[in-house]
Amino acid sequence: MANSANSNPFFKTTEFQIAAIVIFALIILSFIVIGIGITKATRIIKNFEKDFRLISETEEFKESVIKLKRSKFAAFSISGNSLVFSILEFNNSDMKVEEFFKVLERDEKNEVVSAFRSLILLKSFRTDNSLFLKVTDNCGFFAKIGFWFKSNHHTVYEINKISKFIYKEQKKAPKTQNMTTIFLNILNDDKLEVFENKINFFPEKLENFSMYFVFEPLKIRHDSFNLFDLIIFISQKVRKTNN
């Protein structure tokens, strides 16, 4: 009888009640964080789509998209204090983007010089590196959680990601005796190869690396946009206003 009187079910113990309160509080906190995140992500998407709509209706945007669709090749480059966006193609029909990258990787000086000389500028203008951080609203901690929980992944997250990548790479580039070029090779409507080429002139040294980004198709109301449109949007957002 004594043992029966002194024994309590575990769920009635103080330890269980404390644990239950902590777990319940964590669940509530998680829902609050997710709710804040989804709200922030939704606001970022809304602001981005409004901004994209305005820029995509300009003649400058439309003409640039036509040129980029023709070449499927562009670049952001920095040399000294000069930052430039260019839409590129080759003056030699035998030269393809893949072969161009192979030449850079072989690091033979004469071949590299010849490869760069084969490039033609279809369009070029100066850019402001600080503006890459303003291409979209900042996707901070809460927004990242919101994007993760949203049922439909939005391409604004990838745009934010590649914009920050280009900003960081150009920011850390030496201001003298160096040229950094971030080539954008559009493989199809949603897949982008980013090939970064760094040339140090004194001492002579060449570095390369590549990575890939996949972008979700963008649909705003009844209009659909692809990677060509997204690249031009980024370039227009970082364009220096005093060109």
Image (cartoon, rainbow, N blue to C red):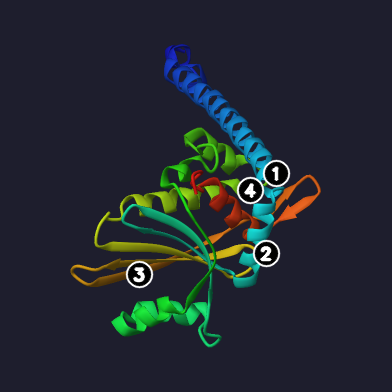
Q: Nearer the viewer, residue 242 or 102?
A: 242
Residue under the image location 61 percent in, 65 percent down = 68
Q: Which numbered disc covers residue 21? A: none
The quarter of the displayed image where residue 67 is located: bottom right
Q: Which residue is mark 4?
A: 153
Label 4 or label 2, whichever comes before in sequence order: 2
Q: Most extreme residue toward the right, as rendered?
A: 222
x and y, in percent, of residue 80 in the image: 31, 56
Label 1 environment density (alpha carbons within 10 Å; few <14, some 14–19, many ≥20): some
Residue under the image location 79 percent in, 44 percent down = 221
Label 2 environment density (alpha carbons within 10 Å; few <14, some 14–19, many ≥20): few
Q: Is residue 206 above or below residue 84?
A: below
Q: Is residue 108 visible?
A: no
Could you tell me if the residues under marks 1 and 3 are in contact, i.e. CB atoms within 8 Å? no
Q: Amino acid at mark 4?
A: His
Label 4 or label 3, whichever comes before in sequence order: 4
Q: Which residue is mark 1?
A: 53
x and y, in percent, of residue 204 in the image: 22, 72
Label 2 or label 3, whichever comes before in sequence order: 2
Could you tell me if the residues under marks 4 and 3 are in contact, i.e. CB atoms within 8 Å? no
Q: Which residue is mark 2?
A: 66
Q: Nearer the viewer, mark 4 or mark 3?
A: 3
Q: Is residue 114 visible?
A: yes
